[in-house]
Amino acid sequence: MTKTAFLAILALQICLDRRGFSPNAMDGQTGAKTRTALAAYCTANGLPPPRPDEEEFAFEKYFPDEPDLFTTVTVTAQDLAALVKIPNDPAKKSALPRLGYETLNEMFAERGHVTQNTLRRLNPHVVWTNATVGTRIKIPEISPVAIGDKAALIKVSLSKFTVTALDAARKPLAVFPCSIAKDKAKRPPPGEIKIVTQIADPNYTYTPDFTPKGRKPARHIFPPGPNNPVGTVWLGLSIPGYGIHGTPLPERIGRAESHGCFRLANWNAEKLYELVKPGTRVLIEP
C-alpha cells in the first residue's frame, strides 16, 4: 500500500474514532472493522453507505472540514518512570504497584488509538528502545467530538462482534468492536440484562485454571493499570461474573477468545463508561 493510501485511510479512521464509531486500533487499512464503523456512521447520520471503491479515500467526502488530524507529543520523564516490566509469575505480578505499560511503543500507540506497527510507520525516526526525554512522537489527534446524550440502551451483537450505544430513539451514538467468549456455552443467552456496577481502574482477582486436588486455589489480586486483564474499566452486568471491560491487548479485539465477558479496547471501554450508568439496559443479540 502506498503512503498516500495509508494516510487517507488513517484519516478516515481518525474521523470515525473521534465520533465514537470505532475501527478499533487504527492501522491505515480498510478492514472489516473500518467498514463496519463507516457503515454505522452513515446509518446514524442519514448518509448513503459508501461504495467499496470509495472507502479508501472517502474521509474528505464524509468529513470535509476535519481539523488537525495529527499532533506531536514528547516523551517525558514521567512517561519513562511509569514503564514497568511485568513478570509472568502471578505472585510477583500481584506485588507490583500498577500494571502499567511495558514499552513506549505500547504507551503511545494506546494514547493514539493505533496499532504499534502504525505508530512505528508514523515515526520512522524513533528508536523505541532508546527513546529519551524530549523525543518527539507523531500520533493521531483523537480529541473526541462530543456525543452529548447518555445511552438509553447498549446492544451487544454476538454475530457482528460489536457493542452499540443507542439513545432513547434507538439512534446509534457509538459503535465499538468487541471480543466475545470462545466457548459458546459461556456466552450470555440472547435477551435483556442491565449494567449494575461501574468501576474505573479496577483490580483483578486471578485464579489459576488448575489447582491440584486437595489444595485451595492460589488466588492473587492484580493491581490496576492498562495491562490489567480487564483493562482500565469494568462495567458489571446483571449476570454474576460477567461484564464489559477493557483489555491489555487492543489489537486482538474482534475475536471469539474471551472467557465470557465482552472485551473492548481500553479507550473504547472508557468512552462507553461515560455513556452509561447503573441500570442502563443491555440487549444481547445473536
Image (spheres, rainbow, N blue to C red):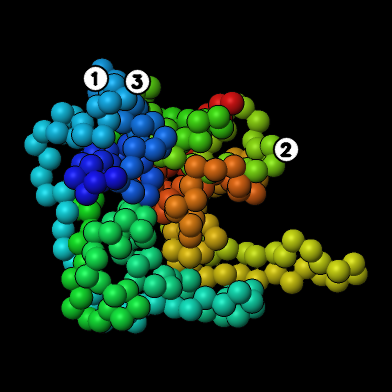
Q: Report the Cα–Cα distance between label 2 and label 1.
A: 38 Å
- Looking at the image, which residue is at 44% across and 53% down? 250
For image coordinates 22% across by 53% down, the residue present is 140
- In the rendered view, tell whether residue 203 sits above or below residue 98: above
**Between 241 and 253, the one nearer to me in the picture:** 253
Image x and y of residue 24, in percent: 38, 45
Mark nearer the viewer, 2 or 1: 1
Sequence-first tag of 2 and 1: 1
Q: Label 1 neighbourhood size at 10 Å, few (<14), some (14-19), many (20+)?
A: few
Which label lies toward us, 3 or 1? 1
The answer to whether one can see residue 174 in this image is no
Name the one closer to the observer, 98 or 29.
29
- Percent position of residue 99, x then y: 48, 71
Q: Mark 3 highlights which residue?
A: 169
Location of mark 1 (residue) = 47
Q: Residue furthest front?
A: 2
Is 53 above or below relative to 117? above
Q: Which residue is identified by label 2?
A: 185
- Which label belongs to residue 220? none
Sequence-first disc among 3 and 1: 1
Q: Are marks 3 and 2 in contact (CB under 8 Å)?
A: no
| Kind of residue at disc 1 | Leu
Label 3 sits on what residue type?
Ala
Mark 3 secondary-structure assignment: loop
131 relative to 239 in the view: left or right: left
Disc 3 and disc 2: Cα gap in Å?
A: 33 Å
User: Dot 2 surroundings within 10 Å: few (below 14), some, or many (20 or more)?
Assistant: few
Q: Do the residues labelled 3 and 1 touch (CB within 8 Å)?
A: no
Disc 2 residue type (three-letter): Ala
Q: Note whether residue 222 is visible.
A: yes
Q: Are marks 2 and 1 in contact (CB under 8 Å)?
A: no
Q: Is mark 1 on a helix, strand or loop?
A: loop
